[in-house]
Amino acid sequence: MWGDWHQLWHIVSVPDNVPIVALLFLVPFYTWYGFREAFAHDRLIGQLEADPQMAKTHHRKPYPYKTGWDKEVHVWPYLMRIEFLAAIILTVILMFWSITLNAPLEEPANPSLTMNPSKAPWYFLGLQEMLVYFDPWIAGVVMPSLIIVGLMAIPYIDANPLGNGYYTYKQRRFSIWAFLIGFLALWCVMIVVGTFIRGPGWQWFWPTQTWDHNRLEFAVNRNLHEIFGIQNRWIAAAFGGAVVGLYFVVAGYLMHRLCMLTEFSRKIYQRMTLLQIVTLHTLLILMLSLPAKMAVRLLFRIKYVLVTPWFNI
Amino acid sequence: MPEENGSGAGKRAGLLDTVKETVKQDLAGLKGVLAEKGKEELEALKEPEKTQLFRSIFRVKRDDTPRSRALSVLTNVFFHLHPAKINRDAVRYSYTWGMGGMSFYLFLVLTITGLLLMYYYHPTKAQAYRDILYLHHDVPFGQLLRNMHRWGAHLMIIAVWLHMLRVFLTGSYKRPREFNWCVGVILMVLTMLLSFTGYLLPDDQLGFWAVTVGTNMARATPLLGHEGPFGAQLGMTAFNDVRFALLGGSIVDANALLRAYIWHCIAIPLIASVFMGVHFWRVRKDGGISGPAPVMLESELKEEKKGPRPVILRPSGTR
């Protein structure tokens, strides 16, 4: 049933979902705020590049500055008053939130009464949502590990020395796109989907659609090799392995083309060592395997691409 | 006899007189001195910062000279995390969004509220849930305390994520701050683990099933989980795999509650504190916060220098 605003309110007003409602506003706001600064810097960079004389004398920040002004300010009071103010404001917000809204407490834990839907804490809902598309060993173990390793690898594979310590979009297009696809499009959107869209049985319920606990979904998901009529499981495994390998080759090649797209990115690409290039490509290909598998599942109803006796992908 | 008596009485009277006289003199002397001393004391009250007590605590003059301003930061154990001076544009909200500092402040709030909650909480199946009810209904401000702890935790996760977003967008992870970015990633993971381990503690349906869903994934760990790839081949069962180690059993039960409690209240906060110490220390040692730095142009790109990089001796953020 559509137009069930009560259902929507029921989801939005669950106390533990309030942070995600906040996230819906905070993440876009701060992304916009960062980009506003980035574009201000990009305009300045454009001016300085057009006018070498100006580049020699300009203080190179989009903020007001006059010769003779101090380049530094005292921490006491100029920084510390901001910190104290921030602490006070934050305390007021936290107090207000805590007085108006109670922390959730359900019935006592009962292993024989399964909650439906039973959801992980909201910050892990991205991983739980991934369970729809991947087996638990990928969604719950490999992907989180790759996220941590991938994040830690960023400084060592980003060979672009520009944009160090100031907002810019123009000078770091590739890395900003890569990060925002991961953080916004995959991590945050998946959390929002897991919170607001997924209902009983982890089925897809659009906002204002009533959560129907008896709804059944007749999804016929097949494995890739079954579509091609392969019966023997060893041949199927080899076939699936070949497809996964093909994905890596094709995605790797496309990534390579992407890195060669502009003259600037070619220049940065030249500076990278072989290890940096291989790591960068591997991590990005693995990250993009999530939307790739989602597309394969949603468009072609394919459950597994690679089926082996020990694990499936 | 009377004479003797008289002389005796005279003697006594003489002693009494002497004492009287002395006391009189002393009192007369005191009158002047007391008034003087009392006046001094009153005068001193007008300027408490000149008293010995005050000077023993705060050793720096409170005035607007640059020296005093710098010293008031450097001589205070709580403030000396800061440099004395910073980049004039670094105080702009649009640069840092204040997210790192807010994360740390929320950690402190969570430590204090968490400590207070520990006074009322037993990590046992019999009592955990009742303790929460007790907090809600009987402990003065108990509900408020629990709310602050819960919402503070959610806020901290959001603050940490936004901090990471800002550090990425400003390119602050670049040379020479690569290592501190890695420490930050670990701190972010620890923040989420802190929140996750706390989720089970009320011992209600919400926490129980969230932790069940979460730890069920550990079953599927490759090699180390009994349902993971090659787990069975390596002899993993539900009673010896990595999930068993996390829960102290094959189901989420009393042992899991105790383990979650110890991870949540002791182990992870300790580990996180160590990493936070390193994180803050490295912010200073890597040259203060990264900017806002002057923009660099594409035409100014130089060949990458190999070899060790110089230690920054003046960590105030200016180059």
Image: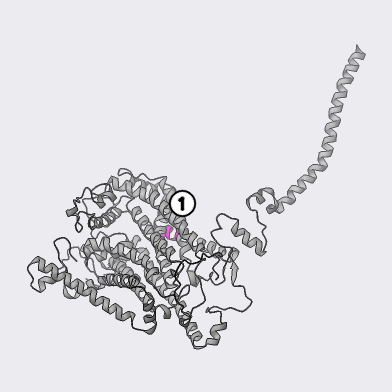
Is residue A207 visible from the viewing direction of this image? no
Picture quadrant of residue A27? bottom left
Q: Which residue is identified by label 1?
A: B112
Q: How is the image coloured?
A: one colour
Q: Is residue B203 left or right of residue A90?
A: left
Chain for mark 1? Answer: B
Image position, residue B140 (x, y; %)? 44, 48
- Residue A60 in the image: state x and y as whole percent: 53, 79
* Front in this rendered view, residue B271 or B6: B271
Q: Nearer the viewer, residue A313 or B163?
A: A313
**At numbered mark 1, what does the secondary structure look like: helix, strand or loop?**
helix
* Magenta-drawn stretch contains A95: yes
The image position of residue A51, as x and y in percent, is: 52, 88
- Outermost residue, top direction? B1
Name which residue lies at 54% across and 78% down: A63
In terms of depth relative to the viewer, which is nearer, B63 or A234?
A234
Start and end of the magenta stretch? A93-100
Q: Is residue A268 above or below residue B312?
A: below
Where, quadrant-wise, is the N terminus of chain A in this rendering?
bottom left
In the figure, residue A184 lies in which quadrant?
Answer: bottom left
With respect to residue A228, does B24 lie above or below? above
Residue type at the position of mark 1 = Ile
In the image, what residue occupies the spot 84% across and 38% down?
Answer: B28
Main SS category, magenta section: helix
Side of B175 relative to B3 (left or right) = left
Q: Residue visible at 82% across and 36% down?
A: B27
Q: Is residue A192 visible?
A: yes
Q: Determine whether, in the image, residue A88 is placed left or right of residue A175.
A: right
Position above or below: A89 against A164: above
